[in-house]
Amino acid sequence: MDVIIENLPQYWDGFLRTLFLSVVSGIIALIFGTVLAAARVSPIAALRGFSMVYVEIVRNTPLTIAFFFAAVVLPRLGITFQQFEVAAIIALSAYTSAFIAEAVRSGVNSVPVGQAEAARSIGMKFSQVLTLIILPQALRTVIPPLINILIALVKNSSVAGAFYVLELFGQGKQLANANGDAVVWVLVGVAFFYLLITIPLGYLANVVERKVAIAR
Amino acid sequence: MTTQVPGDALVSLKAVNKHYGQLHVLKDINLNVRKGEVVVVIGPSGSGKSTLCRAINRLETIDDGEIRIDGKELPAEGKELAKLRADVGMVFQSFNLFAHKTILENVTLGPIKVKGVSKAEADKDAMALLERVGVGHQAPKLPAQLSGGQQQRVAIARALAMKPKVMLFDEPTSALDPEMINEVLDVMVQLAKEGMTMIVVTHEMGFARKAADRVVFMADGQIVEDATPEEFFSNPKSSRAKDFLSKLLTH
Amino acid sequence: MKAFLTRRKTLLVAASAALALSLSACGGSSSTTTNPPVAEKPSFAADSTMAKLSNAGKITIGTKFDQPLFGQKGLDGKPVGFDVEIGKLIAAKLGIPADKIEWVETVSANREEFLKQGKVDMIVATYTINDKRKTQVDFAGPYYEAGQALMVNKDNNSITKPEDLKGKNVCSVTGSTPAQTIVEKYGAVLVPAATYSACLEPLRNHQVEAVTTDNVILAGFVSKEPDAFKLASDQTFTKEPYGIGLKKDDKTFRMWINDQLEAFAKDGSYKKAWDATAGTVIKTAPELPAINRY
Ligand SMILES: Nc1ncnc2c1ncn2[C@@H]1O[C@H](COP(=O)(O)OP(=O)(O)OP(=O)(O)O)[C@@H](O)[C@H]1O
Ligand SMILES: [Mg+2]
């Protein structure tokens, strides 16, 4: 127990970095994932194909590979960054956006097809149909699964600890090594700080889910 | 693009064919609708009436043949098509009002976003239209708070707000409780009287008698008869039409 | 957005190919092996471990099989390196030629057990002497003092000592003692990695200024890629004494080995062993550390 209190600064440092990685990657993934979902339902076959291939490949490969590409392969190609957080953010948002694309797509499919037809019949372009009619309605059903994806993102960010970023999990490994006699408590501390982010998110998901249920 | 159009046809279909996989749903359809004409399309279920409507509005593609609106052939996709679609108003069996928008927004969205009309002007026009179809006082509500008949009248107002050259109705009263059918038909009759060009898929023979200039009877993807209402109802020529009419009357 | 991504994908494919190529293209400077002169009929007090081994004419020695320059299995299946040379020198003093030595792979986790169970007669395997281990086994030596060092890119001449790294990115394994030292004592910015080999890429790409851990491990990396990396200096800034692991409470054997180590230093065979192996990377040959005769 003491080990947690004694090392609060390290925990806090790791916690802030985990929070930073999650928030930035989360925002990028939400935007890019929605664009991917839009591409998936667009009338242009090439966009549909690209989106499908991207989502299927990314969704079905381990996150570690995304990290490897971002942190090791990109620099080899000359795309280097002094802050390894950049690589972590690239990996996490590229990975998470595939899941977000799938969630948004299923949300889009939950909107009755008549809504899109009515919108097209008054002369709306595809982009208008999507942004004015489909996405606003899809959002309600999509929010709870999106929050779950974001919770997974927070946990997934721990992979960054093995790729040059000293986030919460990495700090935990440091502390565990330095405090070999109190490893269990060190990890309890790590778990506590993760829960500090994920539990409020889970609570939010519940609230939204209930709100949506009432609105129906 | 401007080959000679027979007469002053506003909507013209020439040798239109469409398949759904193996199923031949539109077989060599030829149809001309003049400006101000009201054409009622009837026929048994699955005969291709909805597909015809949706093809005219390009919600469905066709395999071959051509469809012209006011002399212009329907473009394949993109902005041009969107523009042309605005000239063709469509009313669906299931209303399809935008569920997340108020009644007023449902009507103003098209003019504002598609035609670039100012919000103030769109609001004014929309209120006038809503008054005309008798739901002016419902303007701030959401679609789900209205009865089916009211929703369908809003859907008509929404289509009219784009100032279309022709209106398509695909069974506009089939999803309604009987006591609400007339309030919608009344609006449609009024519209016909004002000179709107209309293509109406319906089984409401009363409406056909009262407002139609022509009745088109479809069966198995083909136009089997094309006649005035009196002619068609009193003296159908084909056995399919006779059969269909007798079944309709016994129901 | 799409164009960017497709471009990126092609690049990635190219990159993985490049990576595969570079992985197979190891090599560079490596250890050579020597054959020390074998003692003719040495005499030992009867009952001593030396007499037993000498009479048997063979010995089993534990070493690492995966530590370049110290103990790494060669293509012929025999390990080579400085530890191996030390083992051979001792065996020769027992009258045992190099081809009568049985080499057994020992790793950090099994060294104490192997000694206790008598699976090996001695262990020469970058085996750090510490008090915890001394409760279970005995150590002759130390025969070498390793220590924390820095590895930099070949063309980097601005870093020679840990003080030069203040505020700079340095890669090491998460949670390792060297990682803590470089941050707490020298104010470097830690870029933590899962393994030391994972530190090579960021170094190559100039995303970190240096990699830090024991000079022995770093020298191993340098020996594989001598054109890419080098040690910032032959000096170390911490001390890790390596000993020869022996079964507990065989003081006669331990003291005899200590005597031999001192003899190797005197007659130059110690330096010869070094120069043929680790000396290819760590050019400054070490002095034999003061023997700890406890
Ligand atoms: N998207 C589709 N895919 C495959 N077949 C379809 C599709 N839409 C309609 N069909 C088939 O095409 C035929 C014509 O359908 P359509 O909806 O045009 O008929 P309808 O005359 O409007 O019938 P109803 O009176 O039942 O509305 C039917 O056999 C129908 O099953
Ligand atoms: Mg139909």
Image: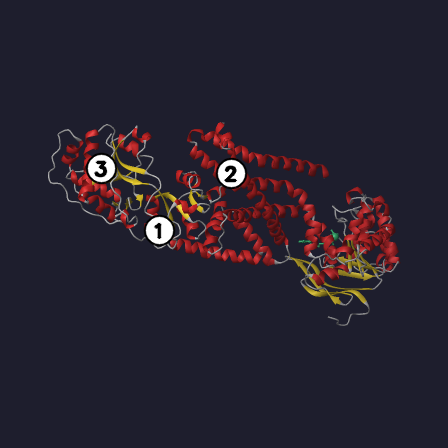
Quarter assignment of residue A20: top right
Q: Secondary structure at mark 3?
A: strand
Residue shown at the point (75%, 72%) measured from the top left: B3
Position of C220 relative to B33 (above/below): above
Q: Amino acid at mark 1?
A: Lys
Q: Is there any visible trace of residue B42 in the rendered image?
A: no
Which label sits in the foreground, 1 or 3?
1
Q: Amino acid at mark 3?
A: Thr
Residue A36 % position (x, y):
60, 52
Q: Name the chain under label 2.
A: A
Q: Are marks 1 and 2 on the same chain?
A: no
Report the residue marked by disc 3.
C60
Distance (Cα) linking label 1 and label 2:
33 Å
The 10 Å Cα crowd at callout 1, few under 14, some 14 to 19, many 20 or more, is many
Report the residue marked by disc 1.
C230
Q: State the mark number for residue C170.
A: none
Residue B175 % position (x, y):
78, 46
Q: Amino acid at mark 2?
A: Leu
Quick check: marks 1 and 3 in contact, CB under 8 Å?
no
Q: State the mark number for residue A168.
A: 2
Q: Nearer the viewer, residue C101 or C194?
A: C194
Q: Name the chain under label 1.
A: C
Tell me: C92 left or right of A7: left
Q: Secondary structure at mark 1?
A: strand
Q: Nearer the viewer, residue B251 or B208?
A: B208
Residue shown at the point (24%, 48%) measured from the top left: C275
Distance (Cα) linking label 1 and label 3:
35 Å
